[in-house]
Amino acid sequence: MSGTAGPAGDGRWYDADAGPLVRPYAVTGGRTEPGPHGVRFDLIALVAVEAGAAAGTLPGPEHEALLRLCRAGTQSVAELAADADLPVGVVRVLLGDLLEAGHVRVGRPVPPARLPEMRILREVIEGLRAL
């Protein structure tokens, strides 16, 4: 990526392909943590739109973009970051805003300690095959 100063030295930075660049801290207003409650979003946490979430009432275009991506279907935090072309840290902060405003719900991944053991799964498969 080659950045150059804007026309007439106005101080704005440009990328030849992307146009004006906006730094991640500008998108989040300088925040690095999602919301006042410090919610932690795992990369595999699933995000879905809440019923009745109205577009146009969000603070920024990045919030709108994430909400639009979630409307297409439930997505993980990692997928949202990739599809929105934003760093994961920025997406986590923006998702915190959306969660607090009641626009999205987040499904937490199941901790490995709560997953069934492989032995039990094999016994179930063997039992089904015996039928």
Image (spheres, rainbow, N blue to C red):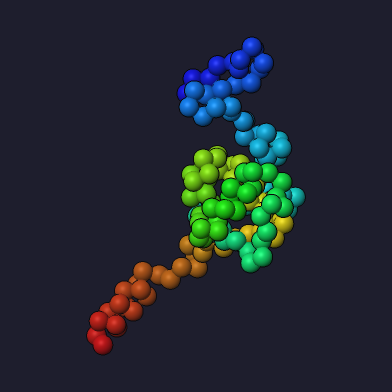
Image coordinates for residue 123, horizontal then vertical, percent: 32, 78
Image coordinates for residue 42, horizontal then vertical, percent: 55, 53
Q: Quadrant of residue 128?
A: bottom left
Q: Can you see residue 35?
A: yes
Answer with left or right where residue 57 lies relative to residue 43: right
Answer with left or right where residue 47 lies relative to residue 116: right
Q: Can you see residue 92?
A: no
Residue at the bottom extreme?
131
Up/down of 37 relative to 10, above or below: below
Q: Residue at x 67, y 65 (%)?
A: 52
Image coordinates for residue 10, horizontal then vertical, percent: 67, 16
Q: Residue at x 31, y 74 (%)?
A: 122
Up/down of 32 relative to 67, above or below: above
Residue at the right extreme?
36
Q: Residue at x 64, y 11 (%)?
A: 8
Answer with left or right where residue 53 lies relative to residue 118: right
Q: Residue at x 51, y 40 (%)?
A: 85
Up/down of 130 relative to 76, above or below: below
Image coordinates for residue 26, horizontal then vertical, percent: 67, 33
In front: 107, or 126?
107
In front: 44, or 60?
60
